[in-house]
Image (spheres, rainbow, N blue to C red):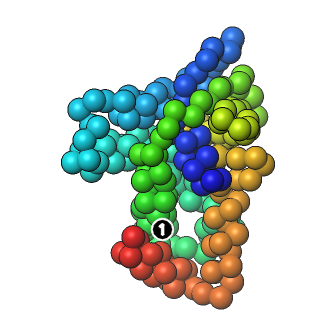
């Protein structure tokens, strides 16, 4: 259930009313999640045969919305410095594929949960948080998007669901792997995971 909520919160929004003084971080998240809704609502993509086309469109939105390098760097934390440039590049690509596989199939089962956006909070000049609430039939779940401004654009680098960080969750898993394995072995583990998906 939590994975499903993370997925929905990462890429879906139905805005009841926009908060006053919404800034660029809010606008970026809203724009991208609305693109997702447009893909999911497109009558031309409703057929089962259009599933792969729909996935491809969602992958493009994911790339626009997320800062893959920042997400990967924060997920590995201090272990990021133990990877060389080639390993980092491959890790970013493999991690993206793992996230896409984990989430996109679930996105396609979207059932009109509602997400309300609250006023963004600037943490620094180049970092902000956009708090939201996912409204289901039985409860309200707090979601926070953590975003960073880099290379002229705001992008998401973490999503926090009910005080559980996506970055922290994966960091724990990768820390456990790297406590017993080398960076090359971590990459090989991820290659096998992607290949088996």
Q: Position of residue 124 (x, y in %)?
A: 74, 34
Mark 1, residue position: 91
Between 130 and 184, the residue placed more toward the observer is 130
**Element at label 1:** helix
Q: Is residue 183 above or below residue 112?
A: below
Extreme residue in the front direction: 137
Q: Is residue 57 above or below residue 80?
A: above
Q: Position of residue 30 (x, y in %)?
A: 54, 26
Extreme residue in the bottom direction: 180
Q: Is residue 8 above or below residue 31?
A: below
Between 127 and 43, the residue placed more toward the observer is 43
Q: Quadrant of the C terminus?
A: bottom left
Residue 35 visible in rendering: yes
The image quadrant of residue 181 is bottom right
Is 150 placed left or right of 60 in the picture? right
Is 74 placed left or right of 184 in the picture? right
Between 31 and 126, the residue placed more toward the observer is 31
Residue 24 visible in rendering: no
Q: Position of residue 54 (x, y in %)?
A: 31, 43
Which residue does the image show at 61% across and 46% down from the upper left? Answer: 5
Which residue does the image show at 63% across and 14% down from the upper left? Answer: 17
Q: Is residue 104 above or below residue 23?
A: below
Q: Position of residue 31 (x, y in %)?
A: 48, 26
Which residue does the image show at 44% across and 66% down from the upper left? Answer: 94
Which residue does the image show at 72% across and 22% down from the upper left? Answer: 119
Is 140 placed left or right of 28 in the picture? right
> Around disc 1, counting alpha carbons within 10 Å, would you say few (fewer than 14), some (14 to 19), or many (20 or more)?
many
Is 126 placed left or right of 152 in the picture? right
């Amino acid at each position: 259930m939590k994975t499903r909520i993370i997925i929905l919160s990462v890429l879906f929004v139905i805005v009841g009313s926009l908060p006053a003084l919404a800034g660029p971080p809010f606008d970026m998240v809203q724009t991208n999640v609305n693109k997702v809704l447009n893909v999911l609502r497109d009558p031309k993509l409703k057929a089962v045969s259009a599933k792969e086309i729909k996935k491809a469109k969602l992958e493009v939105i994911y790339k626009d919305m997320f800062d893959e390098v920042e997400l990967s760097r924060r997920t590995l934390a201090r272990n990021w410095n133990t990877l060389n440039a080639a390993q980092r590049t491959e890790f970013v690509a493999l991690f993206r594929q793992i996230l896409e596989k984990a989430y996109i199939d679930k996105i396609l089962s979207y059932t009109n949960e509602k997400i309300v956006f609250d006023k963004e909070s600037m943490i620094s000049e180049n970092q902000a948080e956009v708090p939201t609430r996912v409204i289901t039939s039985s409860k309200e779940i707090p979601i926070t998007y953590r975003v960073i401004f880099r290379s002229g654009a705001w992008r998401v680098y973490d999503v926090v669901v009910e005080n559980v960080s996506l970055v922290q969750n994966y960091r724990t898993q990768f820390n456990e792997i790297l406590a017993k394995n080398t960076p090359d072995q971590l990459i090989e583990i991820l290659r096998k995971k992607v290949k088996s998906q």
